[in-house]
Image: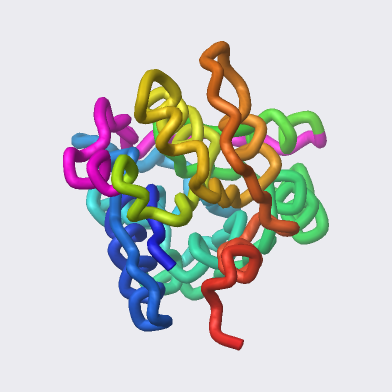
Amino acid sequence: MRIIVTRPEPDAGLLCRRLRALGHQAVAEPLLTIEARRNVTLPDETPRAVLVTSANAVRAAVATGIAPGLRGVAVFTVGAGSARAARDAGFTSVQSADGDLQKLTTLVCATLRPGEGRLLYLSGATVSGDLGGLLEARGYRVERMVLYDALPATALSAPLRRQIAHGDIDAVLLYSPRTARIWRALVGRGELARQALPLRHVCLSRAVREALLQGAAPFSPRVETAPTPDEAALLDLLGARPA
């Protein structure tokens, strides 16, 4: 199968290598570029726990130099990928919700009491969903710390445009609502839109699907949605996991 991977690096490259090892032709076409911010410093108060909804936030914590100051703090992540990144970065107390923001909220509420201290939410400048709001509504004190910017692609690469035009791509993987919106903006008009319609647009979650299908442009692609918002379910749906 010929597959476009739209995740930012380094996740795009890692997933492409995994897919190639399974016999597929994978093309990395990151729709976001991650740039860690400079001059980031930790607050004086040590947080009760750290919240993470993206592996990019963990990598940015390492890049900005704040990770060593947090390694003794419990970390709660939204999924397996961010949990793996946290462990790779040296965090030893890591719990994963293996799902979405609601499941992460439930995990935090089941583990910590609201009055036990401030929660530090490490994130990018743009987030999908309001984790802080969900927890603050339950009495928690949450401080969001922006560590990176995710810069959107302004055009698809010329080689990929040619591959789509020639019918040389079978599927595109979309992992976030923002990348879905970027993809739609880049292919949703003109001749490229018509050429992209036959592609299988495989979405990580319903939120990603909804973002892809929103908009005024007459772009109605083939869309499939993973039954649960995790990579294993997405690859099973794609038919790209070993039996």
Q: Is residue 156 magenta?
A: yes
Residue at x 18%, y 46% (from the top left corner): 159
Q: Quadrant of residue 148?
A: top left
Q: Is residue 230 above or below residue 164?
A: below
Q: Is residue 53 left or right of residue 147?
A: right
Residue at the limit of the structure toward the front, as seen here: 166
Residue at x 32%, y 39% (from the top left corner): 32
Q: Position of residue 22 (x, y in %)?
A: 42, 82
Q: Position of residue 233 (x, y in %)?
A: 65, 66
Residue at x 36%, y 82% (from the top left corner): 21
Q: Is residue 144 above or below residue 203?
A: above
Q: Is residue 64 left or right of residue 90?
A: left
Q: Quadrant of residue 112?
A: bottom right
Residue at x 38%, y 48% (from the top left corner): 6
Q: Is residue 139 left or right of residue 91?
A: right
Residue at the limit of the structure toward the top, as seen here: 216
Q: Choose between 64 and 25: the one closer to the eye.
A: 25
Q: Which residues are magenta?
A: 138-163
Q: Quadrant of the N terminus?
A: bottom left
Can residue 47 be seen here? The reply is no
Total residue callouts:
0
Q: Quadrant of residue 137?
A: top right
Q: Is residue 20 magenta?
A: no
Q: Choose between 177 and 129: the one closer to the eye.
A: 177
Q: Position of residue 87 (x, y in %)?
A: 44, 72
Q: Position of residue 212 (x, y in %)?
A: 57, 32
